[in-house]
Structure formats: structure tokens, C-alpha cells
Image (cartoon, helix red, strand yellow):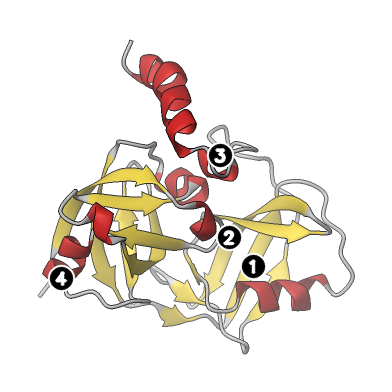
Amino acid sequence: MPEKTLTLRVADAYQRDVGRGIARVDPKVVDELGLTSGDVIQIVGKKKTTALSWPGYESDHGKGTIRIDGYLRNNAGVSIDDKVTIRKIEAKIAQRVTLAPTEPLRIVGGEEYLSQILEGRVLARGDYVPISVMGRKIDLVVTSTTPTAEAVIVTDQTQVTVGEQVKEAPRAIPRIAYEDIGGLRPVIQKVREMIELPLRHP
């Protein structure tokens, strides 16, 4: 029997959640889908991605929203206020994950470092993943996983390898997302309405 799916409206993530690969789901929807904290969900927009589900705050109860950061929005091919469908899925333990940087990347012990910072993350092929190297944010792309699955979870036993640099996709993640600007939520909302919405709905 296929897992139940629901359609939700995309909202911006809270700053504390940015880059963690988690989705804050309307608590009412959490109950309807029988989700528990840390369950893996598939998010389907123009593209598919996966995230760890965490319940949204009580202020989001009944609003039918899913709060995801700029990386997850990019991975799902959606923007704020777009609609996505979600469903609970089972992720497999990753034996191997291959990542490709979108710009030159040289770090001593890089693959061991990546294994540590990605432990516990749920990934899917094609996902963009942010990492911080010496205070600098670099985007990596998941180019393959073993086993091949809708989603895999990185553990301390997962072998992480770095492949050749790839060109950033045309719809790559912006260098600064709305959530990167902390403490200015009302101002950010006004800026977004002035700039983004007229572009999407002229």
C-alpha cells in the first residue's frame, strides 16, 4: 500500500534550520501522516528531494506549510509559496556517497571531514549540499549513491568520495538566501513581496 501524500505550501525556513537538511512540517499534517521527528520524507515539486521531517512550531498549526531552506527549495525546484507534495519514505543506509564540488575544493583530509559533517544527513542523487570550509560556504552535488535509492542516510561507516568539479546548474542555489539574513523577518517578507512576487506573477 503506497504511503499517503499531502500537498503543502512552501514557507521560508527558520535561520537555525538552514543547511541542516530538515523540513518543518505543519504539526497538524505531522499527525495526519503519522510522522515522528527524524522520519524521512520525499518532497516533490518540479524536482524531487528528501529531508528529515521535524514538526513545525505551534504558530504553523493548521496552515498547511512546510518550512524548507534555500537548498531544499532548490533541490525540489520550487520557491516560497509554491506547492509541494510530501510522503514518508524509507531511506537506506549509505555504503558510499560520491559528491562533486561546484568550484575548486582542496581540503586536507577532505573526505574524512565530509563524512563527519554529513553524518546523519539524508541525501538523494542530484541534491545540492552546503558545507563550510574555513568559514567559506561551498556547494557540493550528490552524483551517486550506493545503494541506489530514493534516499540514503550517511552514517559513520559511509565512504564519502569527492569527484571532479561540475558546473553549477542554471537554477543553482543563490549565494544568499532569505534565511541568511537573521533577525529581520518582517523586513525580509516585504523585500520578497516587492522583488520576487512581481517577477513570478507579472
Q: Which numbered disc covers residue 177? A: 3
Tell me the mark number nearer the camera, choosing from 4 and 1: 4
| Cα separation between marks 1 and 2 | 6 Å
Q: Is residue 59 left or right of residue 99?
A: left
Residue 121 on image: x %, y %: 52, 72
Q: Residues within 10 Å of mark 4 (few under 14, many from 20)?
A: few
Residue hosting label 2: 142
Residue ID at (42%, 24%)? 190
Which callout, 3 or 2, points at the residue further toward the start of the chain? Answer: 2
Q: Which numbered disc covers residue 98? A: 1
Q: Residues within 10 Å of mark 3 (few under 14, many from 20)?
A: few
Which residue is nearer to you in this view: 40 or 168? 40
Vertical order, 99 against 184 (above or below): below
Q: Quadrant of the C terminus?
A: top left
Q: Secondary structure at mark 4?
A: helix
Q: Secondary structure at mark 1?
A: strand
Q: Residues within 10 Å of mark 2 (few under 14, many from 20)?
A: some
Q: Which numbered disc covers residue 31? A: 4
Q: Mark 1 and 2 residues: CB-CB less than 8 Å, in contact?
A: yes
| Cα separation between marks 4 and 1 | 35 Å
